[in-house]
Structures are given as structure tokens and as C-alpha cells.
């Protein structure tokens, strides 16, 4: 029976668990329950990915109504791959969050925290799995409301302004997506994504459809914090509780990148987006500016969480850069980076959270001398930091490698060089933290404080992600297999929907336009 | 004639919106928001979207006005002078507006029967839903059955809103003697509300269970029932309202509504169907659809009621405290 419902369970499970976690009420109970549910969702998504890799598409008609009349859940390699990363990070963060949250969130709010986390997980899974454009909006609302709540739960009062800013920007983004979906519905009479794709093709050059595309793209860009719409992200990540930052930084924006990929490749079709609308060049320029501007911003910050937040915006630039290359290799690089960046930022923010747990500050000065006092935490930070830089034998190297290869495949030397130069900034901002931790002495005033390593409950999830960083840097079979079949699949659905004779011209035109 | 009414209503809507932008008195702004909602509700009625109009009137003009008023009680009624430059926002708004107008140029003609929205999925809803779902109100068929998963999602959105408000404000019970709450000296209000409240609750139940046949359903019913309790709390004070339904109980109720909805889905999975496949709930598919829709509408109603009332409690207890200080 379970196999039949495999596609629906990763959404339903956390969705039902959220109100139960609220009823449980007690800290330990709701924590244990949420972790258990998230772990189950991880196992399910693992099975879902292997099923999607072997069978191709799994379609599930909710309510038994065939699409496009009912809502379809549609799992393929692309969303199953991202779902795996989301559920894995969610589970590890939940294990980690027990102690971290005790320090950073009021006791009365603990049950609310775990409820909001489960709601966020349910929303993100729903966005990933659904095959229906309006259903996507509904789950986007669930996950967004839950994230605003999570950000606002920190004991630092500044989180309220950050959450409010995030709320305003996020709501504008969601509204734009809704307007876009509405315009598409007006012109096609359907909300199912596959059905939309077929029918949009028929109405190709309509202004209403183009406006819909523009609204959806801007809305999603706000959600994924694409430069210059990223202003909500650094304060939100800086002031949120550490566990929340670790979770959001490695999942929420990645899911939004997936939504962009899904709309471009499945719903609108690449020739419409990249040739008719010329979005490829726009996205590429914004991505490159994001990489440089935000990497530079990261080097001049003093709060380590803000450094990593700006680094996140820059890394999102790499993902968008990959998809703007409009090739299977470029898309594959994006998909791999979505997965690998989740691992890097998860580990980094967990390490920073551990420092906050012991030292009570995440200012770069607070890191002085911690290399000796908290050796395991700082080692974790170092390895994950090397991964962000893209040092060989880490997951980050694999991402950069595929991105550079994809750029060179099109003879695009400039982009390849820019990617490599961008990495130099990462050396600076990660290096500043490492310099403080290993080469500066612990200040005299702190000597009396009892700063020691955090407990295993925080160290184990942190090190699991760190080891994953190394593992996926050496054995790339899982990531590359999943990412390549995901991107091939995305291109294939795109091709299926287009006239095959036209297709050849278009993809050549794509390559020419992008490389010029 | 319908076009003329539309034009008049839209003009009034635009005027209200402009007035809202330029007014500095927030109390008046909240009132205008209520008028704005009622005007939109009228437009929806004119478009024959009675269910939407009903929701807009009860949520937009009813509950949100109350919540905004309570917020004003905490923050004060004068708008602060903004120090930000307004040029960039103006530019963004103009670009967005221009994009929307550009998008309308190719829109299908208004209300034409050949439009894509009337030609693709809608015909099946219109022709088959009386046979497949068995309800005279097609809106409810689409909402609760064809797109029941969306409605579950929306119910969870409402639930998430409660989580957000509780984490920010929380509901604090106070000792009765601490402060004078409610309007205890107003006898007229007491008498009138005593007459009105039972009728409002009765009407809420009617809307709840009549949603299958006419406009209405769980969302509207939940809001109307919450309005009755809010009236009670306003007139008699929060402590007395807490004695009737406490905030903790409302938290459970909100969770219970979502769980009730989801359990219908789980039960249909247990019976061998897909999630939320009401056909499997009974031997006769039509009867199954009927059971399913009644139960999920009840779940929606319970959650919406509990969330709305609890949010009001959270706002209200905060406002009372700030009044005391």
C-alpha cells in the first residue's frame, strides 16, 4: 500500500505531523516526534528518488481525479533529487536543534518552533512534488508563513525587523507568482503544469503569457534571493536562530531555484524563455553580478552569519549561472550545486550555531582562539569552508568543476574565468574566520569563561554533513547520476513538447546567442 | 447594465484606494479598508462569484477590520511620517502597473463563452460534477473535491498563521481583577449582543452545512462563528470569553480541524483509493463524496473558527496589557 502512495507521503506526513506536534506541547516530545517524522520523510524520499531514477515519472492523482481536472503530484529525477537534500538537511537540523534551540528560543515557544519546522518541511516538499501551478502557490504560502515564524522566534529582538522585511518581500514575491499563474490560467484554462506547457506552446507569442512569465520570474527571483532582489536575505539569516538559518540556507532558496528551473524548462519551454524573451542573458548578467558583488560584501562583514548569508546569495548566483547556459551540462551543474551547496551551508551554519551556543556571539572577534577550545566544531567549519571555496576532494570542487566544464563546452571562456575568480573571494571570507580561529589568541577576558566543545547531539549532525561534503567530493556517482538524469529529463520533457524539426534550429540559436 | 454597475463599482474602488493612500488617520484607513472589501464583494456578486463575495465580505470586511482595529489600539492612530525616499518604490509600482496593463492588451474578451477558461477544464466541472460529485453547488465540488488538496493546503495556511501569531504575541491569561475589560457599563450593548450572538451562531451553522447547496462552506462559517465570539469578548471582556472557550482549547481545536480534514484522506487511502478520494468512503461513490465533503468542510470550519478567535485573543490580550501600562 505504501508504494502506491510513495509520491504523496513526503507531503502528507509532515503536514499531518505539524498539528500533532503542537498538541504534544512538551519540548522533548515535540522535538522527538518532529525528528522522527522528518527521518521517515527522508527514508521515503530516498525510495522516491530510486523509484524515479528507475521508472522515470511517477504521477499521483490526488483525490482520484485525473489531471488536469484534479491535482497531480508528479515526481521525476529532478524534484526527487532536491527533495532528498531537503529532507536529509531537515532531519539533521532537527537533531541538532534540540540544544541550539534551548539556548536561543524561549521555552514556551519550543512546540511552536517544531510545528513551524514541520509546516515548512511540508510546504517545501509540496512545492517540489506538485505538478500543479496553483497547488505550488498554496504550498509556497505554507512554507513562507512557517519561515517568517521561524525567523521571528529568536530571542534577539532584531529578528523581528528581519522577519518583517522578509515577510513583506516574500509576500510581494508570492503575489507576483499568483498574478503570473492567474494570467496563464486566463489564456490556457488549465493549472496543471504539463497541460500548461502544451497549451502555452499553442498561444506562444501572446502578451498575456509573456507578462505571466515575467511576473512568475520576478516573483521566484525574490524568493530565491537573486541579485538585486536579495536584500531580505542577509538580515533574516543573521538574526534567525542558528538552527533555522542552517535549515533555511540549505533548503528554502534551493527549492525556489528548483521552481525557477521547473517553470523555465517544463512549463514555458526553453525556446520561449531564452530565445523569444532573451532571459538567458539577463539571468547570466545578474548571476555574475551576484557572484562578485555579494562575495565582495561577504569579505567586508564582521558578523560571521552575515558573511555566510552574503556568500549564500553569491552561491545562488552560481546556480542561476548554470541554468542560464541553456545546456544539459549547465543545468546539471546547477542541480549538483543545489545539492552540494545545501551540504556546505548546512555544515557551516551548524558550526557557527555551535560557536554561538558556547561563546554567545557570532562576531568574527568571538572566533579568536576557538581552534584550540572547540577543535571539532572549527574543523567542521574548516572542511565545509574549503568546500565553499571549491578545494579538490570536497563537494564544492565537483560543483565548480561541472560549472566550468559546462561553460567551456560552449567555448564561454569569460564565464569560466569569472567562476574561478569568484572562488578567490571565498578564500578571503572563509580565510578571515579561520585566521581568527587558528592564529589569534583567546582574549584574556575570555580565559576565565568555560568555553569547551559542544555536546555530541550538536556535533554528530554537523559531522554527518561534513563527511557528506567529503564523500560527495570523492564519490560523485550519486550526485552526478541523479543530476544528469534530472537535467536530461528536464530537457527531454521540453523537447517532447516542441516540434522536433524546430527544435534543432532553436538549440543552435540558443548556443549562439548565449555565447555571443 | 451589468457593465455600468461594474464601472461605477470599480470607480468607487479606485477612489477608496486613492483615499487610503493619502489619509494619515489610520482609524479612517481601517474603515476604508472595510468599505474596499465590501465594494470588491459587490463586484464579485456582479460577476456571479457569490462564494468569493461571501468570503470577501466576511473575512475582508469582517475579521480583518476587527484585527486591524485591535492593532490600532496597541499602536496609536496616527501614521508616522515616512523618511524613506519614495522615488524607487514609485518607479517599481509604475513598472509593475505598466506590465499588468501590457498583459491585458491580449486578454481574451471579457465574459466571452469561447475563452480558454470556459473551454478546457471548466466544461467537465459544469457537466459532470452533478453526476460525479452530486452537489448542486459546483464551486463546492471544485473546492472540496476536484481540488480538495488545495483546500487542505489553505486550511494549513490558516493554521500556520496561528502558529506565527502565537509565537510573536502569545495569549496570556490574566487575573480577572487586574483590569476592567469589556464594556460592562453599556447595558444597551449587552442586551443587543445577547439577542444577536445566538442568531449569528445559528447562521454560521447554516452556512457551514448549507455550503453544498448554496454559497457558503467551512471558511465563511468559521469566520462568522468566530465573529459571534469576538462580539461576546468585546462586550463582556476577554476573561469571560476565556471562560467560554480558552486559548489552549482553541489551539487544540485548530489542530483537530486540520487532522479531521487529513484523516478523511488517510481513511480513503486505507480503503484503497488515493489521498482524499472520497469515492472510496462509502459503497456508493456519490454518497462517499457527500460524506467526504461534509467532513472536510467541518474540519475547515473548526480550524478557521479556532484560528480566527485565537488570533483575536492574542491581539486583544496584548492590547489590554498595553492599555493598562
Image (cartoon, grey):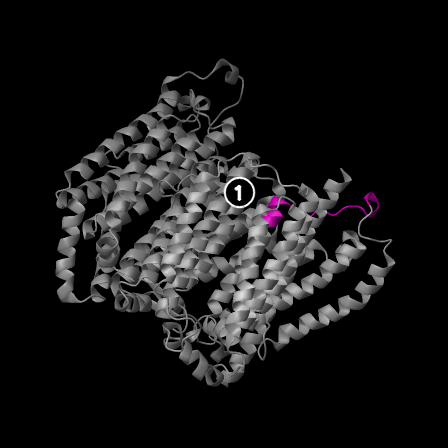
Q: Position of residue A268 (x, y in %)?
A: 29, 60
Asked if one can make out residue B48 in the rendered structure from this viewpoint, the answer is: no
Nearer to me, A194 or A501: A501
Q: Position of residue A330 (x, y in %)?
A: 21, 48
Location of residue A486 with respect to A463 vertically, above or below: below
Nearer to me, B133 or B85: B85
The image quarter containing residue B260 is bottom right
The image quarter containing residue B308 is bottom right
Q: Is residue A183 magenta?
A: no
Q: Label 1 belongs to which residue?
A: A164
Q: Residue at x 48, y 80 (%)?
A: B279
Density class for disc 1 (Cα within 10 Å; few <14, some 14-19, many ≥20) is some
Q: Residue at x 73, y 61 (%)?
A: B229
- Residue range in magenta is B164-179
Q: Position of residue B178 (x, y in %)?
A: 82, 43
Location of residue A123 with respect to B319 vertically, above or below: below
Amino acid at each position: 500500500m505504501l508504494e502506491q502512495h510513495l509520491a504523496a507521503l513526503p507531503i502528507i506526513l509532515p503536514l499531518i505531523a505539524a498539528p500533532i506536534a503542537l498538541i504534544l506541547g512538551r519540548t522533548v516530545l515535540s522535538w522527538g516526534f518532529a525528528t522522527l517524522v522528518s527521518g521517515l520523510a527522508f527514508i521515503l524520499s530516498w525510495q522516491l528518488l530510486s523509484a524515479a531514477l528507475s521508472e522515470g515519472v511517477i504521477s499521483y492523482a490526488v483525490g482520484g481525479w485525473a489531471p488536469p481536472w484534479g491535482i497531480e503530484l508528479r515526481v521525476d529525477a529532478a524534484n526527487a533529487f532536491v527533495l532528498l537534500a531537503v529532507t536529509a538537511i531537515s532531519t539533521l537540523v532537527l537533531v541538532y536543534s534540540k540544544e541550539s534551540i534551548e539556548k536561543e528560543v524561549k521555552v514556551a515557544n519550543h512546540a511552536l518552533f517544531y510545528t513551524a519546522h514541520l509546516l515548512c518541511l511540508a510546504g517545501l516538499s509540496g512545492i517540489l512534488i506538485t505538478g500543479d501551478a496553483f497547488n505550488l502557490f498554496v504550498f509556497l504560502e505554507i512554507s513562507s508563513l512557517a519561515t517568517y515564524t521561524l525567523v521571528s522566534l529568536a530571542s534577539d529582538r532584531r529578528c523581528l525587523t528581519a522577519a518583517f522585511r522578509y515577510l513583506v518581500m516574500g509576500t510581494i514575491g508570492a503575489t507576483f507568482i499568483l498574478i503570473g499563474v492567474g494570467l496563464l490560467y486566463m489564456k490556457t484554462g488549465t493549472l496543471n503544469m504539463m497541460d500548461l506547457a502544451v497549451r502555452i506552446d499553442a498561444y506562444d507569442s501572446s502578451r498575456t503569457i509573456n507578462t505571466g512569465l515575467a511576473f512568475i520570474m520576478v516573483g521566484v527571483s525574490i524568493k530565491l534571493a537573486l541579485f538585486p532582489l536579495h536584500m531580505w536575505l542577509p538580515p533574516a539569516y543573521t538574526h534567525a536562530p542558528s538552527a533555522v538559518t542552517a535549515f533555511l540556507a540549505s533548503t528554502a532558496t534551493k527549492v525556489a531555484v528548483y521552481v525557477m528551473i521547473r517553470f523555465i524548462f517544463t512549463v514555458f519551454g526553453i525556446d520561449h524563455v531564452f530565445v523569444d524573451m532573451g532571459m538567458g542573458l539577463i539571468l547570466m548578467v545578474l548571476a555574475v553580478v551576484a557572484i562578485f558583488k555579494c562575495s565582495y560584501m561577504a569579505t567586508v562583514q564582521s558578523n560571521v552569519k552575515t558573511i555566510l548569508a552574503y556568500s549564500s546569495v553569491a552561491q545562488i548566483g552560481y546556480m542561476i549561472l548554470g541554468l542560464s547556459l541553456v545546456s544539459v551540462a549547465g543545468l546539471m551543474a546547477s542541480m549538483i550545486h543545489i545539492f552540494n551547496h545545501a551540504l556546505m551551508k548546512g555544515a557551516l551554519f551548524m558550526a557557527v550555531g555551535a560557536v554561538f551556543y558556547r561563546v554567545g556571539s557570532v562576531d568574527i572577534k568571538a572566533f579568536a582562539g576557538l581552534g584550540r577550545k572547540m577543535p571539532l566544531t572549527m574543523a567542521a567549519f574548516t572542511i565545509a569552508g574549503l568546500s565553499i571555496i571549491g578545494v579538490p576532494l570536497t563537494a564544492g570542487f565537483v560543483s565548480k568543476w561541472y560549472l566550468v566544464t559546462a561553460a567551456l563546452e560552449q567555448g564561454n571562456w569569460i564565464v569560466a574565468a569569472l567562476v574561478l575568480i569568484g572562488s578567490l573571494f571565498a578564500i578571503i571570507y572563509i580565510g578571515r574566520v579561520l585566521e581568527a580561529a587558528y592564529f589569534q589568541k583567546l582574549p584574556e577576558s575570555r580565559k576565565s569563561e568555560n568555553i569547551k566543545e559542544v555536546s555530541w547531539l550538536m556535533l554528530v549532525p554537523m559531522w554527518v554533513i561534513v563527511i557528506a561534503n567529503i564523500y560527495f567530493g570523492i564519490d560523485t556517482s550519486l550526485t552526478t547520476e541523479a543530476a544528469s538524469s534530472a537535467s536530461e529529463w528536464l530537457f527531454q520533457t521540453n523537447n517532447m513538447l516542441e516540434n522536433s524539426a524546430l527544435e534543432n534550429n532553436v538549440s543552435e540559436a540558443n548556443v549562439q546567442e548565449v555565447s555571443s | 447594465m451589468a457593465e455600468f454597475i461594474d464601472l461605477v463599482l470599480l470607480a468607487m474602488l479606485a477612489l477608496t484606494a486613492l483615499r487610503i493612500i493619502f489619509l494619515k488617520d489610520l482609524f479612517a484607513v481601517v474603515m476604508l479598508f472595510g468599505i474596499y472589501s465590501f465594494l470588491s464583494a459587490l463586484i464579485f456578486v456582479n460577476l456571479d462569484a457569490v462564494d468569493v463575495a461571501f468570503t470577501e465580505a466576511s473575512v475582508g470586511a469582517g475579521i480583518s477590520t476587527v484585527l486591524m482595529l485591535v492593532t490600532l489600539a496597541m499602536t496609536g492612530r496616527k501614521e508616522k511620517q515616512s523618511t524613506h525616499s519614495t522615488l524607487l518604490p514609485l518607479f517599481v509600482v509604475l513598472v509593475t502597473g505598466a506590465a499588468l496593463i501590457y498583459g491585458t492588451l491580449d486578454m481574451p474578451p471579457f465574459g466571452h463563452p469561447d475563452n480558454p477558461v470556459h473551454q478546457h477544464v471548466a466544461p467537465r466541472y459544469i457537466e459532470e460534477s452533478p453526476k460525479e460529485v452530486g452537489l448542486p453547488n459546483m464551486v463546492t465540488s471544485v473546492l472540496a473535491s476536484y481540488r480538495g488538496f488545495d483546500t487542505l493546503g489553505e486550511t494549513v495556511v490558516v493554521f500556520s498563521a496561528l502558529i506565527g501569531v502565537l509565537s510573536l504575541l502569545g495569549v496570556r491569561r490574566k487575573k480577572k481583577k487586574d483590569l476592567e475589560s469589556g464594556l460592562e457599563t453599556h447595558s444597551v450593548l449587552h442586551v443587543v449582543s445577547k439577542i444577536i450572538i445566538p442568531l449569528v451562531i445559528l447562521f454560521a451553522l447554516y452556512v457551514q452545512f448549507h455550503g453544498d447547496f448554496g454559497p457558503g462552506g467551512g471558511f465563511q462559517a468559521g469566520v462568522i462563528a468566530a465573529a459571534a465570539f469576538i462580539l461576546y469578548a468585546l462586550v463582556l471582556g476577554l476573561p469571560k470569553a476565556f471562560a467560554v472557550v480558552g486559548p489552549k482549547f482553541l489551539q487544540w481545536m485548530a489542530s483537530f480541524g486540520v487532522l479531521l480534514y487529513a484523516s478523511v484522506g488517510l481513511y480513503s487511502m486505507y480503503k484503497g483509493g488515493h489521498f482524499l478520494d472520497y469515492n472510496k468512503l462509502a459503497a456508493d461513490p456519490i454518497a462517499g463524496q457527500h460524506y467526504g465533503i461534509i467532513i472536510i468542510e467541518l474540519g475547515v470550519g473548526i480550524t478557521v473558527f479556532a484560528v480566527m478567535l485565537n488570533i483575536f485573543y492574542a491581539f486583544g490580550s496584548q492590547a489590554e496589557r498595553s492599555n493598562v501600562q
